[in-house]
């Protein structure tokens, strides 16, 4: 019954979180990551209260709070900077702020440190060559020629997961949502102290504080046909897509001089039906469920997966039951985040100059109640009753 040795595929947020959680429970963990090193691309990332609870369960909350920027909710404005409504967040509690945003490299560094302190071995530039599950364990041969045997394999290898394809073929492929997100890190002015969300015409932009020094801007717009943009053109493309925005975003647009620092990603969604495992191999994090970023829940969902995975596979029962339990505990919560994120995306993209006044009235009427319902759900314990606290 005992799980002594686990392979984690993917050295991102979920994979490092799982390595830390398992190592803290006395399990020997190997992590492999296809990328050549631990450099993280990307700009900033908000951690809502439920994600901060997971980070607290991993023992790194104080490190997160030391480098991040805590804030209390979202301020919605129109594209000329007029206030629509402030929606305070009910996530968090006396210990955990409602939200804390930080740079992605900082989050990665903190999780990497937690995994290493927990005894995990992390190898870069390594993939799986072959994998043989004989029912009692999994024999794995790696791309560097080495091989080993594991009790369980957990795959946190992202939305384009090679492990998902290995397990389930092409039955479940991520879907392009029809939209892309542009991001850029900037110096933070003193008056950006919470998320500012700007509703434009078929466009939604925002500013999120990351630290005392920095914030980041994001812009979601339709990108028909899932185009591949040349990074050299990012500056011109982002300026063009920020047309019509006044106020802070207009200033940011007018100061863009080139592509430096701009990151573009297509919005891709997937919800893997249960079961998430086959034999002793399970798919987790973005590989199992990836949502539009509208609730800033991607990292939180992966970290919650990681801890539930560690909880369940170290319980005293057959592996099959433990892996089934992981998806049973996680599925509805991940699906709620996916469905709500998608609904917000579609609603915001349907706003144009003509219907903007009606949309603004709708936001004032609906957003507080919708937010309170969703955050009430996310404030519920994410672990099974035996592990929740």
Image: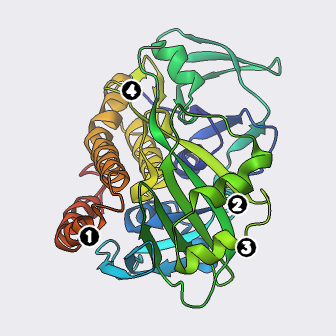
Which residue is the site of mark 2?
105
Mark 4 or 1, closer to the camera: 1
Which residue is the site of mark 4?
276
Q: Residue at x 43, y 33 (%)?
A: 288
Which residue is the site of mark 3?
255
In the image, residue 370 sits, relative to residue 158, either above or below, namely: below
User: Percent position (x, y) of residue 318?
Assistant: 35, 25
Whichever of labels 4 and 3 marks the residue nearer the N terminus, that label is 3
Dot 4, crowdedness within 10 Å: few (<14), some or many (≥20)? many
Dot 3, crowdedness within 10 Å: few (<14), some or many (≥20)? few
Q: Is residue 367 left or right of residue 95?
A: left
In the image, residue 56 sits, relative to residue 144, either above or below, namely: below
Q: Secondary structure at mark 3?
A: loop
Give the distance between the C-alpha atoms of the residues marked 4 and 1, in whole angstroms.
44 Å
Give the distance between the C-alpha atoms of the residues marked 2 and 1, in whole angstroms.
39 Å
Whichever of labels 2 and 4 marks the residue nearer the N terminus, that label is 2
Give the distance between the C-alpha atoms of the residues marked 2 and 4, in whole angstroms.
29 Å
Whichever of labels 2 and 1 marks the residue nearer the N terminus, that label is 2
Whichever of labels 3 and 1 marks the residue nearer the N terminus, that label is 3
Asked if the residues shown at circle 2 and circle 4 are in contact, with their CB atoms under 8 angstroms apart, the answer is no
Q: Secondary structure at mark 2?
A: helix
Mark 4 or 3, closer to the camera: 3
Residue 59 is marked as none
Give the distance between the C-alpha atoms of the residues marked 3 and 1, in whole angstroms.
29 Å
User: Percent position (x, y) of residue 3?
Assistant: 49, 32
Please identify the quadrant where the C terminus is shown.
bottom left
Q: Is residue 119 left or right of residue 306?
A: right
Residue 357 is marked as 1
Q: Is residue 278 visible?
A: yes
Q: Compare residues 324 and 39 and report the one nearer the observer.
A: 39
């Amino acid at each position: 019954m005992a799980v002594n040795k686990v392979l984690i595929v993917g050295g991102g947020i979920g994979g490092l979180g799982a390595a830390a959680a398992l190592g803290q429970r006395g399990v020997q963990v190997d992590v492999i990551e296809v990328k050549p090193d631990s450099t993280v691309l990307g700009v900033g990332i908000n951690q809502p209260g439920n994600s901060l609870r997971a980070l607290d369960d991993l023992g790194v909350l104080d490190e997160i709070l030391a480098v991040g920027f805590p804030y209390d909710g979202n301020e919605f404005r129109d594209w000329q900077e007029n206030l629509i409504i402030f929606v305070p967040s009910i996530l968090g509690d006396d210990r955990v702020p409602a939200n804390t945003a930080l740079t992605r490299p900082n989050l990665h560094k903190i999780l990497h440190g937690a995994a290493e302190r927990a005894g995990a071995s992390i190898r870069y530039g390594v993939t799986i060559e072959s994998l043989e599950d004989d029912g009692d364990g999994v024999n794995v041969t790696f791309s560097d020629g080495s091989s080993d045997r594991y009790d369980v394999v957990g795959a946190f290898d992202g939305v384009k997961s090679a492990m998902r394809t290995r397990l389930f073929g092409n039955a479940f492929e991520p879907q392009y949502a029809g939209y892309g997100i542009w991001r850029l890190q900037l110096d933070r002015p003193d008056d950006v102290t919470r998320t500012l969300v700007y509703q434009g015409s078929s466009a939604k932009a925002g500013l999120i504080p990351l630290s005392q020094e920095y914030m980041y801007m994001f812009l979601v717009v339709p990108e028909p046909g899932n185009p591949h943009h040349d990074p050299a053109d990012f500056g011109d493309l982002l300026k063009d897509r920020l047309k019509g925005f006044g106020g802070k975003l207009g200033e940011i647009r007018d100061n863009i001089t080139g592509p430096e620092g701009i990151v573009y990603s297509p919005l891709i969604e997937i919800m893997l039906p249960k079961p998430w495992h086959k034999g002793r191999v399970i798919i987790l994090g973005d590989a199992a469920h990836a949502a539009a970023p509208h609730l800033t829940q991607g990292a939180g969902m992966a970290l919650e997966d990681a801890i539930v995975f560690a909880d369940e596979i170290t319980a005293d029962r057959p592996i099959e039951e433990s892996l089934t339990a992981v998806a049973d505990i996680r599925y509805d919560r991940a699906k709620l985040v996916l469905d709500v994120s998608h609904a917000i995306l579609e609603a915001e993209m349907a706003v144009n100059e003509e219907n903007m006044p009606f949309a603004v009235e709708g936001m004032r009427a609906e957003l507080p109640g919708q937010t309170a319902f969703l955050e009430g759900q996310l404030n519920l314990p994410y672990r099974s009753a035996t592990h929740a606290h």
